[in-house]
Image (cartoon, rainbow, N blue to C red):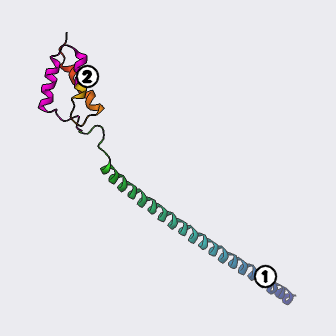
Amino acid sequence: MGFNGATHEHAKLPVLFEHLSLDKEEEEEEEEEEEEEEEEEEEEEEEEEEEEEEEEEEKKKKKKNVKKNAKELPPPPNSVTHCDRPWPFEESLFLLSALSKSNPRSLSSSLLGAHPPSDSSCCRRRRLVTLSKLRPRR
């Protein structure tokens, strides 16, 4: 009986070891799968980093282009233009002589045509505002 019992116990051992060997194989397969997943994640992260770097480079290029274009654009409205420069002495004399006229409508119409070659609407407005300031108050 002891022999049969021992044989019976020995017969169970390979089954136990088979179970252990299956666990080892499953663990190895799981480890391989985890390693593959980690590698894929690392590759994805690297690709994302490369894309971010490319986007940053594009932004830098756009900023450089904007700076170049800003140099080529005309000055903004607040900058000094020909309207901000002082009027020539002859024009100042013309304004004074025009102010002495009695009819203010003829005064404004004569001033509109007496501007130097850079005749623009902003200059006309400035002249009219200046004339309104120079007129004597009644």
Label 2 neighbourhood size at 10 Å, few (<14), some (14-19), many (20+)? few
The image quadrant where one finds the N terminus is bottom right
On the image, the x and y values in percent for residue 91 come to 15, 29
Quadrant location of residue 107?
A: top left
Foreground pick, 44 / 111: 111
On the image, the x and y values in percent for residue 44 come to 55, 66
Which residue is labeled 1 in the image? 15
Q: Which residues are magenta?
A: 81-110
Residue in the picture at 81% in, 84% down = 9
* Mark 2 secondary-structure assignment: helix
Label 1 neighbourhood size at 10 Å, few (<14), some (14-19), many (20+)? few
Quadrant location of residue 76?
A: top left
Foreground pick, 122 / 119: 119
Foreground pick, 90 / 86: 90
Which one is earlier in the sequence, the residue at label 1 or at label 2? 1
Horizontally, residue 37 falls left or right of residue 114, namely right
Residue in the picture at 41% in, 56% down = 59
The image quadrant where one finds the C terminus is top left
Residue in the picture at 30% in, 38% down = 77
Residue 109 numbered mark, or none: 2
